[in-house]
Amino acid sequence: MAHVGQTHHNSVTSSKTEGAVAHGLEKQKDNEQVAEKPYSIYTRREKWFIVMVASLAALFSPLTANVYLPAIPTIASAFHTSIESINLSVTVYMVLQGISPMFWGTMADSVGRRPILLACLLVLCLSCIGLALVPTSAYWLLMLLRCIQAAGSASTVALGAGVIGDIGTPAERGGFFGLFTLGPQVGPALGPIVGGILADKLGWRSIFWFLCIMSAACFALMLIFLPETLRRLVGDGSVIPSPFYRPLVPLVGKGRVDRDAQRPPKPVLNNPLRLFFYLDVLNLLVFNGILYAVFYAVNTTISTIFATKYPFLNEIDVGLCFLAIGGGMTISTVLSGKMLDADFQRTKTRLVKKAEEDPEKRIRPEDVTKEENFPVERARLRMIPIFTAIFVLTCAGYGWSLQRETNIAVPLILQVIFGYTVTAIMNSVQTLLIDLLPSQSSSITACSNLVRCSLDLLVNALGPGWTYVLLAGICLACSPMIWFAIWIGPRCRAKRRARNTAA
């Protein structure tokens, strides 16, 4: 009996050992499969190159809008019309800037990033040629071409954000989005300076020839080097698309394509307006839009307020004042991206440690970054309350420093802080929006652009100047939306996940 019991015990032990070994081999096999199938075939250096090209294209959205502003008096004189009439071209530009990305972004989420980016740049280039040659007797044509110009340039930001959602993992997106926004953030600072110099030295038509040459060069760069990244078409980049989607020179991903890779499902055209019915997404869009409206109010009134409060400044000096806010934004694009990646890793490390210490093993350490387990809202918005408080105080202080006509160094320093904080906040929220719906990252960025431009028009309706002080107070009142996003986000994601699973 003892011998039989010992034999049974050895058999059970052997069975457990074999089971453990089999489980270990199965786990190792799963890990190998995960290692063999990365999120994207592109190396980190290649991803940075793709993001830099997308950032260059995104530069044209704010650059095209702001480079035009210093020449408004000259253009009004050339067309024998009032400055108010030429300012109307700025308004229609903003309207198209808000609406057009809804069309282009949705198309990019369906038919591909590369062809839509090329189409936008081509429209921009051709419209700039038309604006450079428009006769001064055709005011209506100026308005029409400005609308077409906006339709071409405004969507590049949404399309670039879509590229980041395609190639970057959640752990990388913060840094990528930080570099990507360098182009859109530099535009508002450099645009007025470049436009003022060109209009003064070469005439107002030279502004549009400059934009034409720049957009044509960017078009050529993308045509030659930019690969298609839409995951519905190329998966992780290993699927070979039709020749229409391939770059002329396959510089990135060369030699890593899989000719036997299974082609992803046929893309479906989604309605971007449906995104407004997602409570967590709408909450973030409104919060981001309010902050951008405050930034827009500050940025557009720099020239008028500084010229009034500090009459010793000439036009070039006033143009250089834009470098303060632009410098703060440029610094923030780099540092905030690193901060977002560090916060993501910090949250991941804490969850892994908690999972390893959990005796019940409810979550395996390797599963903590799965959508259903990872609190992405908390990781992305961790520093936003602090930045929002600094942002509101800086905005109010900036207004009072101008009201009291303090030393010019005071408002310029506050501009740097203001630019840093507003960029850090908007980048964090925008990165989170891409995390929530990476497959519709262009559409969701287009929705964000629509909300921001709508609030910009509200600023114009109320009048510039002290409007941003009022909006800073609104930002303070809306700050609980940050905690609401952290609270409601996981619930909304769970509902979407259940709905997609059922579908």
Image (tube, grey):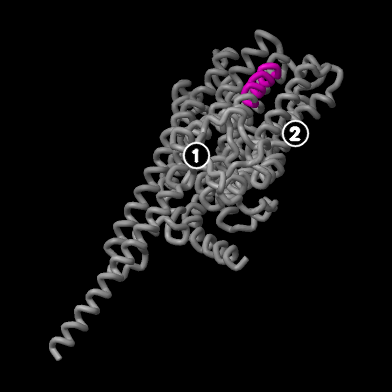
- Residue 473 in view of the camera: no
Front of the two marks 1 and 2: 1
Q: Is residue 216 magenta?
A: yes
Front-most of residues 24 and 310: 24
Dot 1, how many residues are within 10 Å of its Cα: few (below 14), some (14-19), or many (20+)? few
The x, y position of residue 471, in whole percent, is 57, 42
The x, y position of residue 303, in whole percent, is 60, 22
Dot 2, how many residues are within 10 Å of its Cα: few (below 14), some (14-19), or many (20+)? some
Residue lying at 42% horizontally and 53% vertically, measured from the top left? 34
Quadrant occupied by the C terminus? bottom right
View extreme (left): residue: 2
Query: Where is residue 105, by image quadrant?
Result: top right
Which residue, given by chain and number where applicable, does mark 1 sit on? Answer: 256
Q: Earlier in the sequence, mark 1 or mark 2?
A: 2
Report the magenta residues as a range: 208-219
Q: Amino acid at mark 2?
A: Val
Query: Where is residue 467, by image quadrant?
Result: top right
The mark found on residue 92 in the picture is 2
Q: Is residue 283 magenta?
A: no
View extreme (top): residue: 201
- Residue 309 in view of the camera: yes
In the picture provided, is 40 more to the left or to the right than 29? right
Mark 2 lies on a secondary structure that is helix
Quadrant occupied by the N terminus? bottom left
Q: Is residue 61 above or below residue 383?
A: above
Q: Is residue 111 above or below residue 93?
A: below
Front-most of residues 204 and 373: 373
Residue lying at 44% horizontally and 30% vertically, measured from the top left? 331
Front-most of residues 447 and 215: 215
